[in-house]
Image (cartoon, rainbow, N blue to C red):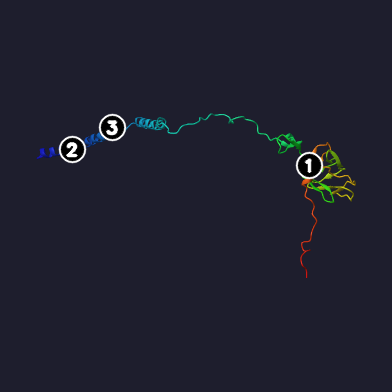
């Protein structure tokens, strides 16, 4: 009986002593499994780095379907053609104001916008001169001529812009717009009368034969029957 009790006690002690050993063995086995499954950091980062490098290099390997027409060159901007400085030129200082060309090829006349605008061939014969230039115009020493003869010489006279002056044959009271020759000599001898400047240049010529004749005013009611 005592031997049986001793054996039972020994078995219990052995079972308690074997438990920690088995647990330690199981824990060691578990740790070995975890360690076996853990990937080193450097070994795990290496494939990732290779993947990134492969991704960045991938677009360069693919041929573009767009054609590069030009290449950027670092430096100052250039202008195609002549790179001339932009400057404004005062054409009024370089333009020729002395002559202007007429419709006839190669023919030139003085660039003066003062001329004969009307000739009256009725009883009150006169030649009208109008200033169509910008600003006043000095007519001092200018003349009217016909058949290469001077028929009238203007006295000291400044014609204002858009103003007119009439030179009448015969006698009369003069004003700013009317001048009388106080002579019986005609203002025109043939069908042409010209306006010449003080240097003798022909500025304007008028064909007297085309001048409209002045008509007498008539009362439109004169012939109507009145009651």
Left or right of 22 on screen, residue 6: left
For label 2, the residue is 15
Residue 59 higher or lower than 195, as above or below: above
Q: Nearer the viewer, mark 1 or mark 2?
A: 1
For label 1, the residue is 205
Q: Within 10 Å of the Cα at label 3, are there few (<14), some (14-19), or many (20+) other Cα atoms?
A: few
For label 3, the residue is 36
Is tag 1's residue or tag 2's residue first in the polypeptide sequence?
Answer: 2
Q: Nearer the viewer, mark 3 or mark 1?
A: 1
- Report which quarter residue 150 is drawn in: top right
The foreground one among 197 and 120 is 120
Is tag 2's residue or tag 3's residue first in the polypeptide sequence?
Answer: 2
Q: State the CA–CA distance, disc 3 to disc 1.
A: 122 Å
Left or right of 30 on screen, residue 224: right
Labels 3 & 1 near each other (Cβ < 8 A): no
- Report which quarter residue 49 is drawn in: top left
Q: State the CA–CA distance, disc 2 to disc 3.
A: 32 Å
Residue sitting at 78 percent across and 41 percent down? 204
Image quarter of the N terminus: top left
Check disc 1 and report its element: helix, strand or loop. strand
Q: State the CA–CA distance, disc 1 to disc 2.
A: 150 Å
Q: Position of residue 112 (x, y in %)?
A: 77, 40
Q: Nearer the viewer, mark 2 or mark 3?
A: 3
Q: Position of residue 199 (x, y in %)?
A: 83, 36
Residue sitting at 21 percent across and 35 percent down? 22
Q: Within 10 Å of the Cα at label 2, are there few (<14), some (14-19), or many (20+) other Cα atoms?
A: few
Is tag 3's residue or tag 1's residue first in the polypeptide sequence?
Answer: 3
Left or right of 153 on screen, residue 16: left
Single out the residue that lies furthest toward the left: 1
């Amino acid at each position: 009986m005592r031997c049986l009790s001793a054996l039972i006690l020994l078995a219990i002690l052995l079972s308690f002593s074997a438990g920690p050993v088995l647990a330690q063995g199981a824990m060691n086995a578990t740790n070995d499994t975890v360690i076996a499954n853990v990937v080193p950091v450097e070994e795990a980062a290496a494939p990732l780095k290779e993947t990134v490098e492969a991704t960045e290099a991938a677009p360069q390997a693919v041929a573009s379907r767009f054609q590069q027409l030009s290449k950027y060159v670092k430096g100052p901007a250039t202008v195609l053609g002549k790179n001339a400085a932009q400057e404004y030129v005062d054409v009024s200082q370089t333009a020729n104001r002395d002559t202007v060309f007429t419709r006839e090829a190669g023919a030139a006349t003085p660039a003066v916008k003062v001329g004969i605008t009307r000739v009256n061939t009725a009883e009150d014969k006169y030649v009208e001169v109008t200033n169509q230039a910008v600003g006043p115009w000095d007519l001092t020493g200018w003349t009217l001529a016909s058949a290469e003869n001077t028929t009238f010489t203007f006295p000291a006279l400044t014609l204002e812009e858009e103003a007119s002056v009439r030179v009448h044959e015969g006698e009369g009271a003069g004003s700013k717009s009317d001048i009388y020759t106080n002579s019986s000599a005609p203002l025109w001898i043939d069908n042409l009368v010209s306006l010449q400047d003080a240097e003798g240049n022909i500025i304007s010529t008028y064909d007297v034969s085309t001048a409209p004749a002045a008509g007498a005013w008539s009362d439109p009611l004169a012939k109507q029957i009145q009651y």
